[in-house]
Image (tube, rainbow, N blue to C red):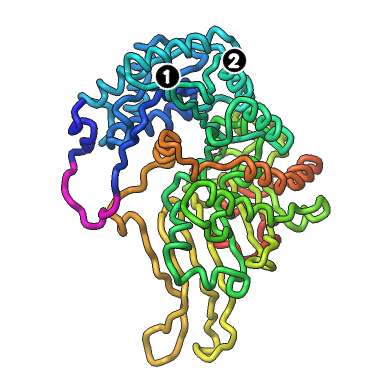
Amino acid sequence: MSEALATVSANGDGAVNPLRAGIASDRITDPCTIVFFGASGDLFKRMLLPAMYALRVRGILPNDFAIVGFSRSKYDDDAFRAYSKEQLDEFCPPDQRPQGAIWEDFERRISYITADFDNTKSYAALKKRLEQNDTELGTKGNRLFYLSTPPSVFPTIIEHLKHAGLNGGEHAEGWARIIIEKPFGTDLASARALQQTVDRVFRESEVYRIDHYLGKEPVQDIMALRFANTIFEPVWNRNYVESVQITAAEQLGVELRGGYYDNAGALRDMIQNHVMNLLALVAMEAPSGPDADAIRSEKFKVFSAIMPPTHDEVGSMSARGQYGAGQINGKPVQSYRDEPDVDPNSNTETFAAVKLHIDNWRWAGVPFYLRSGKRLAKKVSEIAVTFKPIPHRIYGERTDTIENNVLVMKIQPEEGVAMRFSAKVPGPKSHIRSVFMDFNYGTGFGVQSPPAYERLIGDAMRGDQTLFTRWDAVERAWEIVSPVLDVWENTKDFGFPNYPAGTQGPASARELFAEWRPL
Ligand code: BG6
């Protein structure tokens, strides 16, 4: 394979754009095979396979790599290659569709094992295939296992990997790493049980617990904003900040995932992982350096300083909701209880909000409000830091409201940072109005952020754990949400459904916090 072919841009765009200065495509050096457990599933075809192909098109994959699909559906290698091409045709952006020499090289590196997750023969076949890849495709004994199966089979797969001697260790020729999809457990006890299995087979340095929010560029920029600038840190504390609100709102309903979601709910599905990770990034102290454990230790410290609510406090520190029928973008949509595979009397929340306090020197007394829900008025993920009001008013007409400064870190769909501040309205009177300074990544850098999975798979291949959640933080996040889960599970909400699809969520969310930013 020639270097030119390996790094060619799929759209042939060779023009130099000054905004792109500093944006490099870093080729991964270690060869390896990635084994996708659950390769016939939805995540693989929509996200993981397109991410692999994009990494190849952009010249980031090492020259010697291989992909093995390992799943229940029956395919031979050729049929799986054809299936992969169909999925890439459907799910890749037009400039990254499989074609030409890049696709031919990619295709021959794909193979498939029709497997029974609990049968040693399947793992013997996998071992043989990995050895074959080492000799024929130069993958040098390096293995990255990606678990994207239903979580119930995670322990089975992990135990079998050990039994088959595929879990690396000191005597192995290359390295072995494992990426584990969320959810990591369904509550504190099950997460601990899963971790015990993981501990028996892999070292923490080999375990990559994925949270795709951490792979989103604007999420990574939270640390850059805070620690590569001087102006924010001095005011980033209880003396200046009044409250912090973190939102992950979706317009989508549960789609075809009712079976999973009805046993999960918004608190497990979004708050315990994605939203808590955002909270950690916004509240942590500056790490001593850029390495993975320095950063992850600071994130863990934030969680350690959050006292889980007592069962008695849950009522006043949380709000929950479930969507009824309503309208999204002017089109009628059905209620949650009418979605496929959902119990028609379901008490599962599709909206969750919690108020947390971080009991440390920096944040004592500052409430952090977290909310997430499905079928809300719009899709938006953001963190808004609201600063305290001005101490003394000397400006503006009496009827003017002087609003607090707000710094908004916009994660999606807009990606950027906005600052609300007060300005004088032009004219002879001294009217004051809020205006925004608005930075947008797309226009600022002239590129679109790569999808999160591309970044995360690439990092796992490089052996960089920074954007993956360490066990101590996962465990602590479960400890924090556990009392809310307990109380909600044991007390039915007779008001469900309590918000129509396409709205701001339940009224109880406003009772928890009146100043949510409108969706
Ligand atoms: C997943 C949840 O982790 O994140 C889904 O299981 C949710 O229910 C999704 O829809 C949201 O991700 P994003 O990137 O669209 O905000």
Spot occupied by residue 51 in the image (x, y as percentages of width and height): 38, 34
Q: Which residue is mark 1?
A: 68
Confirm whether the magenta stretch covers residue 286. Answer: no
Residue type at mark 2: give it: His
Q: Quadrant of residue 264?
A: top right
Farthest front residue? 171
Q: Is 231 left, or right, of 107 in this rendering?
A: right
Q: Is 296 left, or right, of 28 in this rendering?
A: right
Judged from the image, the secondary structure of the residue bearing numbered disc 1 is strand
Q: Is 421 left, or right, of 158 in this rendering?
A: left
> Does 1 appear above or below 463?
above
Q: Residue at x 36, y 31 (%)?
A: 30
Magenta stretch mostly in which secondary structure?
loop
| Residue 11 makes an appearance in the image | yes
Judged from the image, the secondary structure of the residue bearing numbered disc 2 is helix
Q: Is 119 left, or right, of 212 in this rendering?
A: right
Confirm whether the magenta stretch covers residue 16. Answer: yes
Q: Residue at x 43, y 73 (%)?
A: 435
Q: Which residues are magenta?
A: 13-23
> Does 314 appear above or below 96?
below
Q: Residues within 10 Å of mark 1 (few under 14, many from 20)?
A: many
Residue type at mark 1: give it: Val
Q: Quadrant of residue 110?
A: top left
Q: Which residue is mark 2?
A: 163
> Does 483 appear above or below 135?
below
